[in-house]
Image: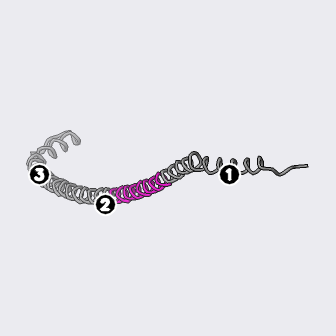
Amino acid sequence: MIDINTSLIFQIVNFLLMIIVLNYLLYRPIRGVLKERREKIDGFESDIERMIQKANDRGADIESRLAEAKREGFNKKEEAKGQGLEEEKLVIDEANNQAEEALKKVKAQISEEIVVAREALKKDLEIFSADLARKILGRSFS
């Protein structure tokens, strides 16, 4: 059986004093350090979340700027292509006009040469016909 005497009361008081002393000297400082660490970790986590959000916002901004730059580049390319086609049409039209002019000049020159050749042949026609008749008939016409 257990006897309750003064030594048990002394041990209970000693135990309670030890808990109080340990609480002030050991547990409270450790809990304080743990609380500070938790606060720092929470602060770091909120900073990380803010930075991630900021990075996502910047990424979205960069994406939108890139898309806008692509649109502008495409529009400028199409505009330049349109200008190139217009210039090409002008150059081709000018080349066609020059070719037509040259063709008209050549046709006129050929027409002139045909007229000159006909005149020359008309002059020689009598001589050729007489020579031809003489060769075919074997005698001369005079």
Q: Which structural element holds mark 2? A: helix
Q: Is residue 45 left or right of residue 111?
A: right
**Disc 2 and disc 3: Cα gap in Å?**
51 Å
**Disc 1 and disc 3: Cα gap in Å?**
133 Å
Residue 64 located within the stretch drawn in magenta: yes
| Comparing labels 1 and 3, the label whose residue is closer to the camera | 1
Give the percent coordinates (x, y) of residue 108.
12, 55
The residue singled out by tag 3 in the image is 109
Give the percent coordinates (x, y) of residue 56.
43, 56
Q: Amino acid at mark 1?
A: Leu
Mainly helix, strand or loop, the magenta region? helix
Label 1 Cα crowd, 10 Å radius (few <14 / some 14-19 / many 20+) = few
| Comparing labels 2 and 3, the label whose residue is closer to the camera | 2
Q: Is residue 123 left or right of residue 10?
A: left
Foreground of the two, 58 or 22:
22
What residue sits 56% from the left and 46% below the top?
A: 25
Q: Is residue 55 left or right of residue 117?
A: right
Residue 51 located within the stretch drawn in magenta: yes
Using the rendered view, name the quadrant where residue 81 is placed: bottom left
Start-end of magenta stretch: 42-71
Query: Looking at the rendered structure, which numbered label has been put on residue 75?
Result: 2
